[in-house]
Amino acid sequence: MYDISQIVRKNILSLVPYSSARDEYSGQDAMLMDANENPFNDPLNRYPDPRQRELKQKLSLVKKVSPSRIFLGNGSDEAIDLLVRCFCDPGRDNIVSIKPTYGMYKVCADINNVEFREVLLKRDYQMDLFSMLDNVDRNTKLMFICSPNNPTSNNFAREDIVMLLKNFRGLMILDEAYADFSSEPSFLEELDAWPNLVILQTFSKAWGLAGIRLGMAFADEQVIAVMNRVKYPYNINWLTQQRALEQLEKQGEKDQWVKNIIAERNRLSGELERLSGVRRILPSDSNFLMVRFADPKKVFTGLQSKHIIVRDRSSVPLCEGFLRITVGSPEENDKLLDALKKMNLD
Ligand SMILES: *Cc1c(COP(=O)(O)O)cnc(C)c1O
C-alpha cells in the first residue's frame, strides 16, 4: 500500500486545520447563531458548505467516483497550487514535468520556491519517458503531465502514461482539462488501480462555466484528505456550487456542445489547411487548433486589428511559427476564416 506520510510535507502532516462550529454539527435544520452572519438576505447571507457535500454527491454519480475521492477547487489552478504546497518542501523538493505545457504548473512551483524540471517533448510531441525518469530523484514529489496537452493539442500515448505511473513513486498529476474533446477515454475509470494518480478536470471548458471558477481533482482518499486540510474553508462560494448543480442536471447540453465543438474543429481545420500561408495544423484532441503560419506575427497582428484575438505560441519550444486558435461558434469560425482569406498570409 502507498504510504502518503512519506510524501506529504511534515508540517502539513501535523497541521491542525481550521474548523468551524458547523463542521462539528451533523444534524439538520439548526438555528445558525455560530458564525456571525447577517440573519437577513437569505440565502447569500450564509457561509457555503465548506465540504460541498451536495455538489460532490451529484458529481459522484456523474463521474462514478466516491465523494471521498473528489476535491473541489476555485478552478483547477487551486488544486495545482495546493498540490505543490502540500507535497513539496520549498527549497528542497522538485517537480518533473514536460515542455511545452500549461504555464500554471511552473508558476505555482516558482511561487513556492520549488524546483521545476521541464523535459522537452520529442519531435512527435510525445513524452520522452527516459529523460523524464532520469530527472527524478529522491526529492521529486510530483510529476505534472497534461493530456490532451496544452498547447500541443495532442494526447499522450496511454501506455506511456501507464509506464510513468508504474515507475514514479511520487504523485503523478494528470491534467485532463480537455478530456471531453478527446478520442481517448479519461483515466478516471482507472483511478482505483493507481494510488499515486491525481486527475484534474474542470468546469471551464466542456461544461462552459469558466466564469464560475470550479475545478476538480480525483485521487486516492488519503491525497484528497490532505488537500482538504489545507484549502481555504469556504473555497467554493455558494453561487458556484448552485450553478454547478444546475449544470450537472443538464449533461445532455454539455454533450451537445462538445459534439458541436468537435465538428467545428474538424471543419475549421479542413478549411484552414487550404489557405496558402498555412504551413501545418497539428492533429487536435482538444477544443483548439495549433496552426503554423509562414509569418505568424503578421497573422497575429492582422487578426488583432480586426478584433480577433488568438494566442501567439510562436516562440514556444517545438511550437515555432504556431498560433493557438480556440474553436469558436460556427459564426465566429466563419469570421476568422473570412479575415484570414482577406489577408496576404505569405
Ligand atoms: C484551461 C485549462 C485548465 C482549466 O483551469 P481552471 O483553473 O479550471 O479554469 C486546466 N488545465 C489546463 C491545461 C488548461 O488548459
Image (cartoon, rainbow, N blue to C red):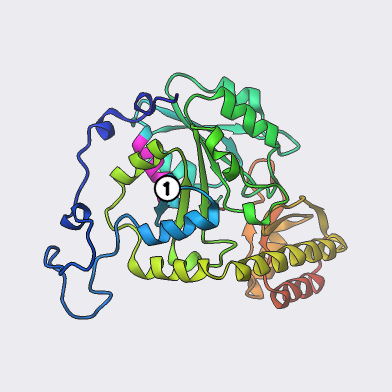
79 in magenta: yes
On screen, residue 92 above or below 296: above
Residue under numbered circle 1: 79
The residue closer to the viewer here, 191 or 184, is 191
Please name the predominant secondary structure of the magenta segment in the image. helix
| Residue closest to the eye, 229 or 143 | 229
Q: Which residues are magenta?
A: 78-86
What amino acid does circle 1 point to? Ala
Instruction: Give the answer, above or below, for where 259 lies relative to 72.
Output: below
Residue 243 position (above or below residue 290): below
Q: Position of residue 109 (x, y in %)?
A: 42, 39
Question: In terms of image quadrants, where is residue 69?
Answer: top left
Q: Is residue 113 visible?
A: no
Position above or below: 31 against 233: below
Q: Answer left or right for 50 relative to 245.
A: left
How many marks the image carries: the answer is 1
Residue 45 horizontal/vertical position (percent): 23, 74
Quadrant location of the C terminus in the rendered image: bottom right
Q: Residue at x 42, y 22 (%)?
A: 139
In the rendering, at what x and y percent does residue 119 appear?
59, 31
The answer to whether residue 4 is visible is yes
Task: Give neighbour class at mark 1: few <14, some 14-19, many 20+ (Cα, 10 Å).
Answer: many
Q: Residue at x 40, y 33 (%)?
A: 114
Q: Which residue is painted at 77% across and 56% down in the image? A: 293
Q: Quadrant of residue 50?
A: bottom left
Q: Quadrant of the N terminus?
A: top left
Image point 61% across, 71% down: which residue?
Answer: 253
